């Protein structure tokens, strides 16, 4: 009986430790650097001008109105409606893209580069918005979403957050992380899994990852 109780206690401890570690892994500061573009009167525009709230409320990439906008932490967000603007102002952290709006697959290699937010270049994981430099970047990331999320958050916390994005990018383009793979290698891996129908997220199918 004592042995069984001890085993049960150990198992419970391991589960709690794993849950705690996972919660820590996916928590990152989100106050810069930011990936922005210049458009019209907005010199530091986030999400290529797409509405940060619409991803959550409409499950779609919706262009924001240049006349409906808000400045937050030195960058600008546009919205499709005043209601979305007000919703963002109530809780910016809920709607801001992770990793400052840089491509999440790039942050997976500690390379802050690329932008996303348009059709097929975004995804909501565990209640957070992630954007990608292109559809292929999202496809590659989703071959192992949980692993890549863990690595990306770890590298953002350790190297990218609060840094000069340009310097960090060039450093990691020269000194690659150990798990780095070329776009060509990733695409070949993706195509092989597509042919075998073993992709976690098959094209046209719902995402096979927990929302929270």
Image: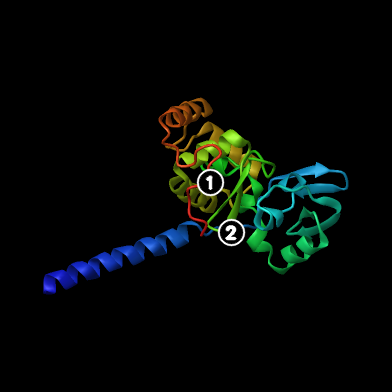
Q: Which residue is mark 2?
A: 29
N-terminal of the two: label 2 or label 1?
Answer: 2
Q: Nearer the viewer, mark 2 or mark 1?
A: 1
Residue 72 x %, y %: 75, 60
Q: Residue at x 28, y 68 (%)?
A: 12
Question: Horizontal and vertical percent for residue 209?
Answer: 48, 50
Q: Is residue 49 left or right of residue 161?
A: right
Is 124 or 93 nearer to us in this picture?
A: 124
Quadrant hosting residue 29: bottom right
| Image location of residue 111, percent across then percent down | 57, 40
Going 43% across and 46% down the picture, which residue do you hit? Answer: 147
Q: Which residue is mark 1?
A: 206
Label count reads 2
Is 89 left or right of 150, judged from the image as shown? Answer: right
Image coordinates for residue 44, horizontal then vertical, percent? 78, 48
Crowd tier of the residue under label 1, counting other residues whose Cα lies within 10 Å: few below 14, some 14–19, many 20 or above: few
In the picture shown, does residue 54 fall above or below 135?
below
Quarter occupied by residue 81: bottom right
């Amino acid at each position: 009986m004592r042995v069984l109780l001890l085993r049960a206690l150990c198992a419970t401890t391991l589960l709690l430790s794993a849950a705690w570690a996972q919660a820590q892994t996916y928590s990152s500061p989100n106050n810069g650097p930011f990936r922005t573009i210049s458009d019209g009167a907005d010199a530091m525009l986030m999400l290529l001008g797409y509405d940060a709230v619409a991803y959550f409320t409409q499950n779609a990439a919706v262009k924001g109105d240049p006349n409906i906008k808000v400045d937050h932490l030195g960058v600008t967000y546009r919205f499709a409606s005043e209601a979305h603007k007000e919703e963002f102002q109530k809780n910016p952290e809920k709607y801001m893209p992770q990793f400052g709006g840089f491509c999440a697959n790039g942050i997976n290699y500690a390379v802050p580069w690329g932008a996303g937010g348009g059709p097929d270049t975004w995804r909501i994981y565990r209640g957070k918005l992630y954007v990608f430099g292109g559809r292929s970047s999202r496809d590659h990331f989703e071959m192992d979403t949980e692993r890549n999320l863990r690595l990306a958050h770890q590298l953002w916390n350790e190297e990218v957050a609060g840094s000069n994005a340009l310097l960090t990018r060039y450093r990691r383009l020269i000194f690659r992380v150990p798990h780095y793979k070329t776009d060509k290698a990733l695409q070949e891996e993706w195509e092989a899994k597509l042919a075998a129908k073993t992709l976690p997220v098959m094209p046209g199918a719902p995402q096979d990852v927990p929302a929270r």
